Each structure stands twice: as structure tokens, then as C-alpha cells.
Amino acid sequence: MSKKPLIGVTPLYDYNLASWWIVPGYLEGVQKQGGLAILLPFGDSEADADELVSRLDGVIITGGPDVNPQLYGEEPILQIGLLAAKRDVNERLIYEAAKRQDKPVLGICRGHQFINVMEGGTLYQDLPTQLPTETRHSQRKPSYVTTHFVDIIPDTPIHAWTGGLTDLEVNSFHHQAIKDLAPTLKAMAISRGDGIVEATYDPQRRFCVGLQWHPELAFRDHPVHALAFKALVDACR
């Protein structure tokens, strides 16, 4: 009997309670597709990150607070949201270890943005002030409700794992987004109406995918979003 792929999930950090936590959908999304998911610890050691990732088959970098703009050479603007220095340090080490070892990586929301920054791209620090659009990227409806469409680019991984879909309705909870796409990445899906890059991949790696939306909140009500977790688990086998 073959072993199930073991996928590490980066935690969220609550500064008020000095505690780690996770949205259950990240773990359940992996487990329902035949993988095992574990919550990773925080750390600041490159050696520890390398050893930790060596024992994993893949990594999910989760959603959460804003990425520090100093990581892409900008000073924070007044509209910047909550920052999380612990996450910036920990996730950089985990991401770089996964890249060195060519382990599959899935970035969701903040994770999608973080991959772009780690690869040399930049972000809009605040969409409402820097790129006003009629598309509501921070929805008011419940988290599992899908509210706007992205157009899928043909011949990309997401086009393949969704069986050739040309568009996808997504849920959306972000006020930041990719501004300059990193040179190593390619776009997979574009927000309809305003052209924001909502999904990326690295064609030189086994699996390195970023999704701006939240499949971990949507997959129970919209099975198409479970396919992101299936694609990750399959890449980890």
C-alpha cells in the first residue's frame, strides 16, 4: 500500500493571543483528495526549514495578513493592512527550501501574493486606492459564496485540471493583488473586468501554483474548487 502524500500547511499567527491557528478547510481539502496535511511550526532557521521540507511531499502557503512591502522594495502606504513579520520570515524559509528541493507548492491568497514577491514581483498595496475597479475583490457575502469570474488562460495547469474550463466563478477576500508579475511566473487566470492576475504558475518547476481566491472555503459547496487540492496531491505522489 502506497503512502499518502504528506503536505505541510503554514499556520496563521494571532499576535493578540500569541497563538497559531489554521482554517480547517486547508487540511480537509488535502485529506479529501487522498493526502495527509499537517500544520507547520514557526521558525527562523534555514537548516531547520530544509530538514522539515525534506520530510514533506509538498507545501501550502496560506492566506492571511498583508505581505510587508519592504520585501519588494516599497514603503508601506497608509492603507496597508495588518502585517505579520513572523509569517514573512517563516514562509520565506519554507518557500525557499521547497524551491531548492523542487517540492510542490500551492499558495492561496496571501500565499499567491507571497510567491510572486519571493520571485521578484510586486503588489498593489491597496486595490481600492491604487487600482479602483467595479469588481468586488473583498466580498461581503459568506465565505463559501462565489461572487466574480476569472477567465482561464488556455494550455495552463488550471485549464488542464479543470477539464478545459474557460472561466471560473470564485470567492474573493483581498485588498492587495499582483502588480508586476514575477519574471519566473506565468499567469493562469485573469479577473474579468479589471485584468488582475488571479492565478499563476512556474513552468520550470514540478508544481508551483498561486491562487488569489479561497478554494479551502469554497470546495464543500462548489466541487470544482476541490480540484486545486487534487492537483497538488497528485503532484506530490
Image (tube, rainbow, N blue to C red):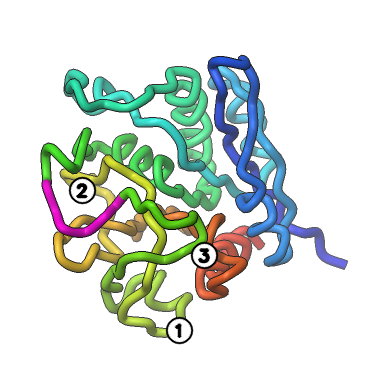
Amino acid type, mark 3: Ala
Residue identifier under label 3? 228
Q: Residue at x 34, y 42 (%)?
A: 113
Note whether residue 212 is visible. Answer: no
Of circles 2 and 3, the one toward us is: 3
Q: Which residue is drawn at 47% across and 55% down?
A: 214
SS of the residue at dot 2? loop
Q: Position of residue 67 (x, y in %)?
A: 34, 30
How far, Cα to Cα, is label 1 from label 3?
Answer: 12 Å
Q: What number is the disc on residue 181?
A: 2
SS of the residue at dot 3? helix
Q: Where is residue 157 in the image (x, y as percent from the top left)?
A: 40, 70
The one nearer the camera, 28 or 90, is: 28
SS of the residue at dot 1? loop
Depicted 81 relative to depicted 203: above or below: above
Location of the C terminus by quadrant is: bottom right
Residue that extends furthest to the right in the rendered view of this protein: 1
Location of the N terminus by quadrant is: bottom right
User: On the image, which quarter does residue 194 sit in?
Assistant: bottom left
Q: Position of residue 154 (x, y in %)?
A: 28, 78
Residue range corresponding to the magenta coloring: 132-137
Q: Residue at x 51, y 48 (%)?
A: 102
Q: Where is residue 211 in the image (x, y as percent from the top left)?
A: 40, 55
Residue identifier under label 1? 163
Q: Residues within 10 Å of mark 2 (few under 14, many from 20)?
A: some
Amino acid type, mark 1: Gly
User: On the image, which quarter does residue 15 sit in?
Assistant: top right
Q: How crowded is mark 3: few (under 14 residues within 10 Å), some or many (20 or more)?
A: many
